[in-house]
Amino acid sequence: MANNQIKKIGVLTSGGDAPGMNAAIRAVARTCATNSIECVGINQGYKGLLDEDFTELTPRAVGNIINRGGSFLRSARCKEFKFPEVRQKAAENARKAGIDALVVIGGDGSFTGALKLQTETGIPVIGIPGTIDNDIYGSDYSIGFDTAINTAMEAIDKIRDTAAAHDRIFFVEVMGHGSGYIAVYTGMATGVEQIVMPPKKDKENKNIIPDGDELYDEIVSELQKEDGRKKSSSIVIVSENGKSIGERVRIITEEVKKRMPEKDIKETTLGHIQRGGSPTTADRVLATRLGTGAVEGLLKGEYGMITGVRDNKIVYTPLRDNTVAYDAENDFDVKRTHEIIEEFRRVANIMNI
Ligand code: F6P
């Protein structure tokens, strides 16, 4: 499609919501208006494309939402979208509504659907990383991560008060899916005694390798060292297992209790509190830049890309880097990952002296 043929852009939020998604929707709508392009909001992610549930997004329609958490368009994980015939139906509905191109705000699952939609139906798409997990390859930060780590930091500071008052050990589970970003950032910011990173995955990058005695013994051995350091409390951050919120911290706490029966040990799961709240300045600014970058990207022909920020500059990276692909040479499925910078973990360890 020639870029001057884009007359109407659809925007949707998909997957887990993230604070700042509204700021991104606002930026998409207003950048469209500036370029004399109509903007239509698609409610409830890909489901709204199937149900033809659309909302006109004029610059005024997106007023007073920059400060709001959640998603004004609502979000959903649309399981049916994995079927090609469903994607064809979605494309038909988009065309019927005059939508020439699509902005998808979400994470890697949403991007996999977006790329398939473009490849199979020819509708140009562009992604905006919107997830608290910060696990999108092609952007230093994703929308919602900064708010989530600030929420988690405040909660852990509060847990520290009560942990210190009672000489307790606290295991605190944070979200992040498989990425560990929330764990590392909040761990460093709150000065916790240990950070338990997400469980590893098998060669196919599909199944989670269950935790075992080796991990539990290592946690206990580190906690025993704390006794020698005369600390009044210990906090261990546990990154979720990517399967079931709260499950990993419950199992780890039980195993450590068995090994340290003399200690007063408690567990807390921060859970979905990390997904809500008014976005921080950093998230509002990031979302606004990425929203504008996405529309400008479509106008420049950056189809099938994600709009990201690297070294504080807007960059475009192929969506396929964030989808699961087959690596014929090594015979397994791969997805490029946004790895935790090793320096972060090293510094967090130095601080725990
Ligand atoms: O991707 C965001 C996230 O909050 C992850 O950190 C977490 O694993 C997952 O979504 C929880 O999903 P749901 O809200 O569907 O339980």
Image (cartoon, rainbow, N blue to C red):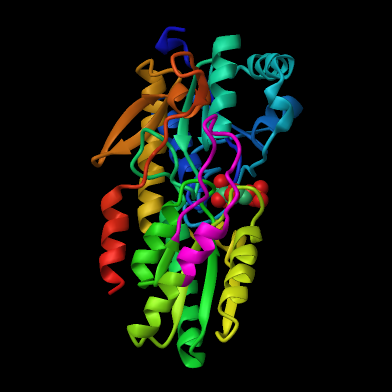
Is 130 rendered above or below residue 172?
A: above
Q: Quadrant of residue 309?
A: top left
Residue at 64% across, 48% down: 243
Residue at 59% across, 17% down: 117
Is 184 rendered above or below residue 104?
A: below
Q: Nearer the viewer, residue 241 or 155?
A: 241
Q: Is residue 219 magenta?
A: yes
Q: Nearer the viewer, residue 264 or 20?
A: 264
**Residue 278: x, y in percent?**
50, 60
Q: Nearer the viewer, residue 77 or 5?
A: 77
Q: Quadrant of the C terminus?
A: bottom left
Is 225 rendered above or below residue 211?
A: below
Residue at 72% across, 32% down: 79
Chain part drawn in magenta: 196-220
Image check: 149 left or right of 40?
Answer: left
Can residue 172 be seen here? The reply is: yes
